[in-house]
Image: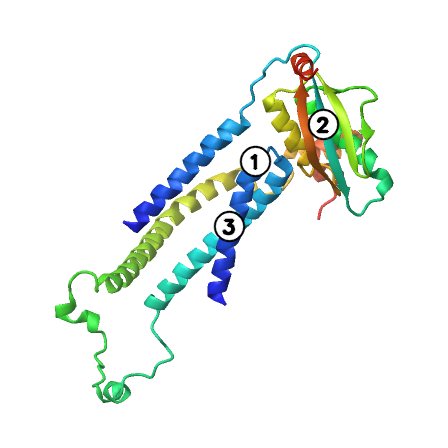
Amino acid sequence: MRRLSWVLGTVALIGSGSYLFVYVYRWEWHRALLVGILFLAALVTLCTALVLRRLARLDTHLSPDTRSEPPPGALARLRAAPVEATPFRWLRPEAFDGGHIFIPVLLGGGVVVSGLAWLIERVAGSSARAGVEEELAAELVAVAFPAGGLVPTDAEALTAGAGLAEDPALRLLLGPAATGVTR
Amino acid sequence: MRRVLAWVVAAAVLATGIVLLRAELMTVDVPQPEGSFTDVVVEAQVVQEEAAVHEEMTRGLVSTCRLLVNADVVQESFAQVGPQTFAFRLQPGLDEFDQRELRGCLRDTRVQHLLLDVRRLETVTPRDRDDRN
């Protein structure tokens, strides 16, 4: 069946190619176009089949035959082989070729760097806190209570006694002391 | 050795085909003497259509193909000369290259369900007429 398909494809290719030539030779362009499409289709089909056949051959050569039985005694030999149980083999001195120690060094380096970063953060925080507090205290002076408290001055008390507190502008200027209202 | 021989044969066939196509598809305008004309007789085969449309479909194809060769159908020259056979005259006469192109166009499948077979395609010059007489 496969050989028959190859024969049919080849015959179609040769036939359509020949008729393509003949129709172009006869100036019959529409027929040539139709046969040219058939020729291209046969050509693409045959080329694809060739590539697939070559790939199938390569696949057969490269892949192991899984359907065959394993060699006799292989399983018994595998089970009888001693089990190697050497933990942290990459830390053994004979394994120190540079590459095996990379991950432990990386992990240890990470721990050391994290400790250093924590220490720097603590020192920086403690040194910055004193300066920040002094600066904040200096800024709060502007809004601090007066040193003498909120007691009205003599001038304010005199103004209130003379009845001048009826003036709204002066009353606003003097504040609660001018009206005698206290909290 | 066989593979080389096969490639050589293929190259020879290809070269021969290209030379043949070049010779056949060449278009050279050969001036025809004044008074010359070309007589054409075609046989039409129509499928899936009524017989009454034979002449109409043939006229359509002839009108299309005569544009390719730049010649006019002589007025009242298109006539049915047989059950499915039609004849017409083109003027001026066609040279050898235009005859090939017209024959190919008429035999081509340009009109669906219509197939023409060129029975006669001949260019007649005044000298040919004198020789016949």
Q: Name the foreground residue: A108 vs B16.
A: B16
> Does A95 sit left or right of A76 as displayed?
left
Per the image, label 2 sits on a secondary structure element best described as: strand
Q: Chain of mark 3?
A: A
For the residues bearing labels 2 and 3, Cβ distance under 8 angstroms: no
* Dot 3 alpha-carbon crowd within 10 angstroms: few under 14, some 14 to 19, many 20 or more: many
Q: Name the foreground residue: A31 vs B116.
A: B116
Outermost residue to the right: B52
Q: Dot 3 corresponds to which residue?
A: A13
Q: Residue at x 34, y 57 (%)?
A: A118
* Mark 3: amino acid: Leu
* Dot 2 alpha-carbon crowd within 10 angstroms: few under 14, some 14 to 19, many 20 or more: many
Name the disc covering residue B40, or none.
2
> Does A23 sit left or right of A124 as displayed?
right
Give the distance between the C-alpha atoms of the residues marked 1 and 2, in whole angstroms: 22 Å
Name the disc covering residue A106, or none.
none
* Mark 1: amino acid: Val
In front: label 2 or label 3: 2
Residue B25 seen: yes
* Dot 1 alpha-carbon crowd within 10 angstroms: few under 14, some 14 to 19, many 20 or more: some
